[in-house]
Amino acid sequence: MKDLANRVKSATNRRSFIQKGLAVVGTAGVGAGLLSNARPAFGDEPSFGRLTEGDAAILRFLAAAEILESDLWEQYWELISGPAVTSGFEATNPATGTKPTPTGGNAAYTTALQILDGDMPQYINDNTDDEFSHANFLLAYLKSKYANTAELDLLVGTHFRTLPGSMATGSTKKGRLTNLTQLTIDTSYWSKYRSNNKNPDLGDTSFDQPVPSLNIGKHSAIPRTDADASNTNLINAIAFTAGFHFCFIEQGGSSLYPSLAQRVSNPEVLRILLSIGPTETSHFQTWHDKAGNANTNPNGPPANPPFTVHDPINNSDVTFFDLHFNQPETLQANLIMPEPCPFLSRSFPLCSIIRPTATNGAAMGAVNALTGDGLFIGQTPEFSELLKALAADADQARRESGY
């Protein structure tokens, strides 16, 4: 533990919270990442030598983001049931070093999710597998370069895994890094990708939301107890909320990787970002397609009336609309491919792109968005400071010459 404390302290003096926090972290709390600076036990080292400080900072922040994604996707994964669970599952849980064991899931939640698509259990299974693999790869790559990962060890371990998750059937009821029960979901990504005359990188800020009420108050994306699962309207609303939250999370990754790729120096690090980033986009488009089926009339027009549900725990209301009918282009459900929009300058022809991809403040913007989403409600100030410190380092990275 002294060795770990010294490595954290030497990494940055301004992160005094880690030094204080380590006093209460037991050996088990460090988790599978204890051997942060040990020599890699696999094959030859990757090419191009050691990392620049900037490249290491970018990879550390992305690894932190993937660890957080792993935590939230594991919560969704535990609650799904059926033969698709663990089908083709290749990656181990970065927090345990082992493949997750199916819990049997929550039948009511799974049925509600399948309103969005019958293959939702398979997609959730695969998305979880992917995020585990991203976190594991980035951690292993950093260690292969002898980069300091002490801060990531705290996220991998149990120190910050204190938030309660679902207590419903299917959940392992263990401590979590992220909170999926008090979300405030900005669904403006919906019209950002459907707009042909706006781009947030060019200063545009007003984008329509398909579910405005998700961006007001707090909403649960998982059943908190079996009482939630036994209320048909409520569990359907919870599943629909999850569908739009899946999109929110994955559109962030779609933007984050190309935004930070503009700052890396090492060609191999650039290759990593250009290889992982498109998988996040693949996830986003899948969820983008499925979320549009919330409150859909399967028999065609006329459209279903709005579906409104009150959550007595969060004291919030949510209304889902049938987005397949009587909607403007910016909200229409089936327009899931990015519309061409202004790019770099409004003087150029429109171009279909990922948006936003501006690099300035990209990492801190991601932290702020996840915080605003409610994912960290209940976390400690030290946790928030850790994420902000990792983001600040990533945003300060600059492309260096000589590569």
Image (spheres, helix red, strand yellow):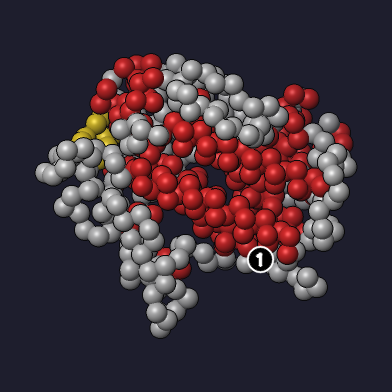
Q: Residue furthest left?
A: 302
Q: Is residue 115 above or below residue 42?
A: above
Q: Is residue 49 above or below residue 105?
A: below
Q: Residue at x 65, y 50 (%)?
A: 61
Near mark 1 (Cα within 10 A), the count class, few <14, some 14-19 or many ≥20, is many
Q: Quadrant of the N terminus?
A: top right
**309 on left or right of 251:** left
Quarter of the image holding residue 236?
top left
**Which percent across, then down, holds residue 282?**
49, 50
Q: Is residue 136 visible?
A: yes
Q: Residue at x 41, y 28 (%)?
A: 222
Tell how many labels: 1
Q: Is residue 9 visible?
A: no
Quarter of the image holding residue 134?
top right
Q: Which residue is mark 1?
A: 263
**74 on left or right of 29:** left
Q: Secondary structure at mark 1?
A: loop
Q: Residue at x 73, y 60 (%)?
A: 268
**Which percent across, then down, holds residue 355?**
46, 62
Say which amino acid is labelled 1. Arg
Q: Residue at x 78, y 70 (%)?
A: 403
**Which percent across, then down, holds residue 68?**
58, 39
Q: Nearer the viewer, residue 398 or 268?
A: 268
Q: Is residue 176 above or below residue 212?
A: above
**Which percent across, then down, holds residue 45?**
85, 51
